[in-house]
Image (spheres, rainbow, N blue to C red):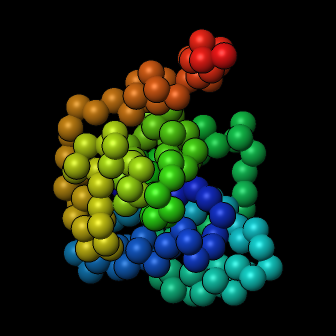
Amino acid sequence: MKILTVGRIAPIKNYEVLIEAAKILQQRGVHFSVTIVGESALKQDEAYEKRIRQESAGLNFQFVRKKTQSELPKIYQEHDIFVHMSRTGSLDKVVLEAMACGIKVLSCNEASRNFLPANRIFYNSTDLAEKILRNEDDNFDGRQYALDHHDLKKLISRISALL
């Protein structure tokens, strides 16, 4: 199982949740890999990134430096599950990018609760590990959802209609 997350490495992104879930998966003998695409953007986040790298050592984590928008679709499509741990309350574009690329998304973000099925929402690292393990089929087409609700042409048309 190939797990992916994309974004800057900063405390608000809650990478500890993914590390703890990975420890649970490892204890249960699950074969997996985790790819983190991103890096600390601010000087104050460099120590956090270093800590995350240390805490994930021995858990089959791969860190990949920031990629361009044109490089990301291939990376999304090479993975099975996208995990979004940020609890900002707003919808992060990486969730929509992952869904548009056809990858299954698991999220703990409150904004994701408005459209993701309940079996794709997690509340802590234990719950995340269980959702990864179960990998339930729910017939939710994230790609279609992203196209239907977040397509740029449709957004422009809606904005134009309002004006």
User: Would you place residue 62 above or below residue 77 in this image?
Assistant: below
- Residue at image position (69%, 87%) is 47
**143 left or right, relative to 134:** right
Q: Could one spot residue 57 in this view of the protein? A: no
Q: Nearer the viewer, residue 4 or 160?
A: 160
Residue 69 in the image: state x and y as whole percent: 71, 41
Where is residue 97, by image quadrant?
top right
Q: Nearer the viewer, residue 133 or 128?
A: 128
Residue 39 in the image: state x and y as whole percent: 70, 67
Residue 10 in the image: state x and y as whole percent: 63, 73
User: Would you place residue 139 above or below residue 25 in this image?
Assistant: above
Where is residue 62, by image quadrant?
bottom right
Residue 27 in the image: state x and y as whole percent: 27, 80
**127 left or right, relative to 150:** left
Q: Residue lying furthest right in this view?
A: 43
Q: Quadrant of the image for the C terminus?
A: top right
**73 left or right, relative to 104:** right
- Residue at image position (42%, 50%) is 111
**25 left or right, relative to 99:** left
